[in-house]
């Protein structure tokens, strides 16, 4: 007879108050998995087992099931309601992940959220036997259940996947060239009163593709490339000075065209400041001439407002 699952006195799981709902849910999942012959192993991954990740009452449970018969397991998803009544569920099968695994992401009526990743035993062992630990495991994992010792060869997490990486000179040059290039698109959109396209360039391109990476490099450089800012800049405020954070806040804007012009020039100012400082410390060339000429263009387009082109 399988022993009842117990997670008490496990220091690696970081739960408190409302997180008790999550702990109770995890216990229910483990009790069910322990008694279910189709489930051969269970892992907990992501922020709850990553010492570099922030955890709060909204942190999800990220569960990995390894099952003996994947197709049979996926044929009926009613099992997800063993742990609460669902509000919504996202279903993604193996074809969405190159045949490696499936996903069931569930939002429950008690407002907990569980992301279930489901492997066949064969596909799981393929991942285990890869030369490098896959990123989802390298950021942290904990084996909660293993009925057949199939996790015994898993490499320990290094957490390297979450650390800010030092850019090469080519990466540095490319990012700043692209950063200044895309400013020209924003300026044209603002002159045209084309708010949707301007916001796409400001937020999707400039912020997420260039600005975020720029700030990561700044923080990485300040911490000898031994720091994690978590995904999408979640920990930027923690590692930046109040003065620098205020400058970065200025790059956010509302719907007013003039406010977006202000934000665009805030982008330019912080880009110049971070770029020149990092170039000196890294020993890489900063595109100062490009910086100057694009600034001139921005001022030129701004001065044309209200005039015929």
Image: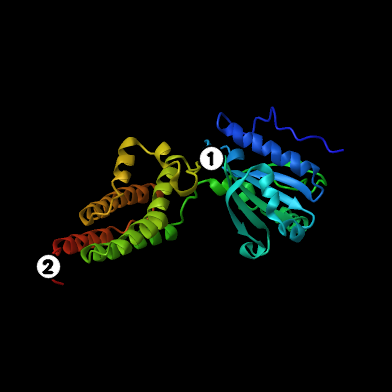
Q: Secondary structure at mark 1?
A: loop
> Which residue corresponds to the image point at 65% horizontal and 50% vertical from the top-left?
116
Left or right of 288 on screen, residue 303: left
Residue sitting nearer the eye, 234 or 274: 234
**Residue extending furthest right?**
1
Q: Quadrant of the N terminus?
A: top right
Q: Quadrant of the C terminus?
A: bottom left
In the displayed structure, 17 sits above or below 180; it is above
Say if residue 22 shows up in the picture: yes
Query: Residue 206 lies in what quarter of the image?
Result: bottom left
Q: Secondary structure at mark 2?
A: loop
Give the number of the disc on residue 53. Answer: 1
Instruction: Report x, y in % for residue 298.
Output: 21, 61
Give the number of the disc on residue 307. Answer: 2
**Residue extending furthest left?**
307
Instruction: Report x, y in % for residue 2.
Output: 84, 38
The local crowd at label 1, few if under 14, some if 14 to 19, many if 20 or more residues have their Cα within 10 Å, is some
> Which residue corresponds to the image point at 69% horizontal and 36% vertical from the top-left?
27
The local crowd at label 2, few if under 14, some if 14 to 19, many if 20 or more residues have their Cα within 10 Å, is few
> Which residue corresponds to the image point at 66% horizontal and 54% vertical from the top-left?
132
Query: Residue 47 lies in what quarter of the image?
Result: top right
Instruction: Report x, y in % for residue 155.
Output: 70, 47
């Amino acid at each position: 007879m399988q022993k009842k699952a117990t997670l008490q006195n496990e220091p690696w799981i970081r739960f408190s108050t409302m997180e008790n709902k999550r702990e109770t849910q995890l216990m229910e999942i483990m009790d069910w998995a322990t008694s279910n012959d189709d489930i051969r192993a269970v892992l907990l991954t992501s922020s709850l087992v990553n010492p570099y990740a922030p955890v709060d009452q909204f942190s999800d449970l990220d569960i990995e099931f390894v099952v003996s018969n994947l197709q049979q397991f996926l044929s009926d998803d009613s099992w997800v309601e063993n742990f609460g009544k669902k509000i919504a569920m996202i279903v993604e099968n193996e074809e969405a992940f190159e045949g490696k695994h499936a996903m069931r992401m569930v939002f429950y009526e008690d407002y907990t959220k569980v992301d279930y990743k489901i492997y066949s035993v064969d596909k799981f062992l393929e991942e285990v036997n890869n030369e490098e630990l896959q990123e989802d495991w390298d950021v942290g994992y904990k084996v909660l259940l293993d009925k057949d010792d199939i996790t015994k060869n898993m490499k320990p997490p290094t957490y390297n996947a979450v650390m800010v990486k030092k850019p090469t000179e080519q990466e540095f040059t490319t990012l700043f060239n692209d950063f200044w290039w895309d400013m020209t698109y924003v300026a044209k959109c603002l002159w045209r009163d084309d708010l949707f396209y301007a916001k796409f360039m400001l937020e999707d391109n400039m912020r997420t593709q260039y600005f975020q990476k720029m700030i990561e490099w700044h923080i990485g450089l300040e911490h000898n490339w031994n720091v994690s800012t978590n995904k999408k800049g979640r920990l930027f405020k923690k590692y930046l000075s109040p003065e620098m954070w205020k400058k970065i806040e200025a790059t956010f804007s509302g719907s007013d065209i003039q406010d977006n012009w202000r934000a665009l020039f805030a982008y330019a100012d912080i880009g110049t400041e971070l770029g020149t400082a990092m170039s000196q410390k890294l020993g890489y060339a900063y595109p100062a001439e490009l910086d100057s000429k694009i600034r001139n263009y921005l001022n030129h387009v701004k001065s044309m407002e209200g005039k015929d082109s």
